Image (tube, rainbow, N blue to C red):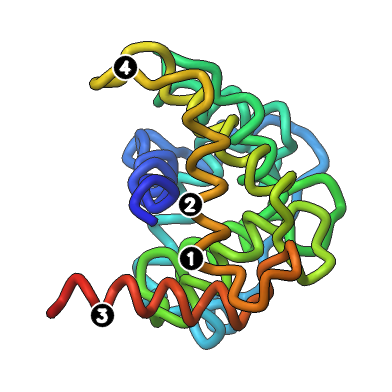
Amino acid sequence: MSRYFCVTYILVELSFCSVDSVEDEMEIATVRHRPEALELLEAQSKFTKKELQILYRGFKNECPSGIVNEETFKEIYSQFFPQGDSTTYAHFLFNAFDTDHNGSVSFEDFIMGLSILLRGTVQEKLNWAFNLYDINKDGYITKEEMLDIMKAIYDMMGKCTYPVLKEDAPRQHVETFFQKMDKNKDGVVTIDEFIESCQKVSNDKLI
């Protein structure tokens, strides 16, 4: 589970980057997305109003229009993985944040996702992770979807991993994943199977 929680660090870095240099007077004259009142976001998320103000300044510094499209998201994300190709994984990650599927991530989208990743309950984090793996959003994870995610992760990590990974490593990972999670052997993993298996792994590590 730890690989996709690296998203947390990356998104926090993106938000706080050059916060002190943000000046409202220097914003470019473009059509802008105005976020919901911070009081409402404070009630909906697990951030304080002060934290939201800081996050918003950082977000606007990277995305002056107030929204980020997929190409910009990919460009920002690629900076953190110069040794590999993060394009495909960034695409899946972008779709997980773009909850209304309108092709852009607003500050509200960003905050709600970040709130779960940083301060959500185990159940909330697992629901978010399931949504990431469920590429077509039909409520199930198939082997094909899991393989697409695994290949994207290995592409993102690049050829510099140690020990060197075999070419069939993504497929082996998927087979192991399904052996543990596909309880009724119907070829797909439901949200209940996913959460139950992940919680069992977590509990086993604590024993």
Q: Which mark is residue 164?
A: 4
Farthest residue toward the bottom?
43
Mark 1 or 3: the one toward you: 1
Mark 4–mark 1 contact, CB under 8 Å?
no
Q: Which residue lies furthest to the left in this view?
A: 207
Q: In this view, does 202 lie to the left or right of 191?
A: left
* Residue at image mark 2: 176
Circle nearer the N terminus (1, 3): 1
Quadrant where the image shows the N terminus:
bottom left
Mark 2, other Cα within 10 Å: few <14 / some 14–19 / many ≥20: few
Label 3 crowd (10 A; few <14 / some 14-19 / many >=20): few
Picture residue at 35% right of the left edge, 34% below the top? 18
Q: Which amino acid does label 2 sit on?
A: Thr
Whether label 1 touches label 3, CB < 8 Å: no
Q: Do the residues labelled 3 and 2 touch (CB within 8 Å)?
A: no
Asked if 186 appears above or below 146 in the picture, the reply is: below
Could you say whether the residue bearing mark 1 is in a helix, strand or loop?
A: helix
For the residues carrying marks 4 and 1, which lies nearer the camera in this image? Answer: 1
First in residue order: circle 4 vs circle 3: 4
Distance from the alpha carbon under mark 4 to that under mark 3:
30 Å
Instruction: Estimate the x, y position of residue 27 in percent, counting from the top left.
Output: 61, 35
Residue 59 or residue 206, whichever sits in front: 206
CA gap between label 3 and label 2 equals 19 Å
Residue at 61% x, 69% y is: 182
Mark nearer the N terminus (3 vs 2): 2
Q: Name the residue under label 3.
A: 203
Mark 4, secondary structure of its residue: loop
Circle 3 — which element?
helix
Using the image as rendered, state which of residue 98 and residue 40 is in the foreground: 98
First-in-chain label (4 vs 2): 4
Q: Nearer the viewer, mark 4 or mark 2?
A: 2
